[in-house]
């Protein structure tokens, strides 16, 4: 079970390489603690199981990427291999990956709004002078630049054993 450590319970799925996932299933839920109009769901990540595949497989993937905003070249190299043994009752799967990703994000922010009262103002539509108009003014703003470079390397393996039609063990 994945949970988030933030107030909104968000989970960062970027920790998972897409190479190990076979499918993602989203199941809508209703919960009493949700505000009206909100949507809750369970997200089920289903990993690849070698005995569920019709054939053994071997895949090598090479990607080249360019982010014009970050002005960086990135890559991804991955390989996945699965084999079945013992009359298709034992399956083995391994995937390995190495990837880089550079990101740039420019942001304008407004950090503080304060109430103020103008002793006189002019109504734009009528041209009349109005007195004591209260509104909000921005007292702090600025620009932020975020430059992130990520490099991920990893591997995952799975072993699936099905000694009978009613028994299955997976690691």
Image (tube, helix red, strand yellow):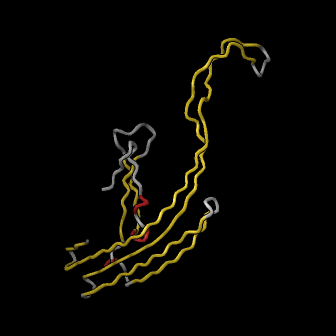
Q: Is 108 left or right of 155, judged from the image as shown?
A: right
Q: In percent of the image, x 26 and y 71: which residue is there?
A: 171
Nearer to me, 160 or 29 = 160
Residue drawn at point x = 38 percent, y = 76 percent: 95
Q: Quarter of the image holding residue 143? A: top right
Q: Does residue 57 lie above or below 131 as drawn?
A: below
The percent position of residue 67, horizontal first and vertical second, equals 61, 63
Tell me: residue 87, above or below residue 2.
below
Above or below residue 79? Residue 20 is above
Total number of numbered labels? 0
**Measuring 47% from the left and 80% from the top, which residue is drawn there?**
60
Point out residue 147 in the picture as x, y percentages from the top left corner: 55, 55
Q: Quadrant of the N terminus?
A: bottom left
Q: Quadrant of residue 158?
A: bottom left
Q: Nearer the viewer, residue 135 or 170?
A: 135
Residue 36: give x, y in percent of width and height. Answer: 43, 37
Which residue is pictured at 36% across the width and 81% down the height?
A: 82
User: Is 77 located above or below residue 125 in the figure?
Assistant: below
Picture quadrant of residue 26: bottom left
**Residue 14: image location, x then y, percent:** 43, 60
**In the displayed structure, does residue 4 sit left or right of residue 144?**
left
């Amino acid at each position: 079970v994945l949970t988030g450590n933030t107030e909104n319970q968000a989970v960062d799925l970027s920790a998972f390489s897409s190479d190990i996932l076979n499918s993602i299933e989203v199941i809508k839920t209703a919960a009493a603690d949700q505000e009206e109009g909100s949507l809750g769901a369970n997200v089920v990540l289903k990993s690849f199981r070698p005995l569920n595949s019709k054939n053994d497989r071997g895949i090598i993937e090479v990607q080249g990427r360019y982010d014009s905003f970050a002005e960086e070249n990135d890559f991804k190299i991955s390989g996945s291999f699965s084999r079945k043994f013992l009359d298709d009752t034992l399956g083995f799967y391994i995937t390995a990956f190495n990837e880089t990703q550079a990101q740039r994000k420019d942001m304008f922010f407004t950090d503080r709004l304060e109430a103020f009262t103008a002793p006189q103002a002019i109504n734009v539509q009528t041209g009349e002078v109005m007195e004591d108009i209260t509104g909000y003014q921005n007292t702090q703003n600025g620009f932020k630049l975020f430059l992130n470079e990520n490099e991920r390397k990893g591997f995952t393996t799975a072993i699936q054993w099905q000694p009978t039609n009613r028994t299955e063990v997976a690691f």
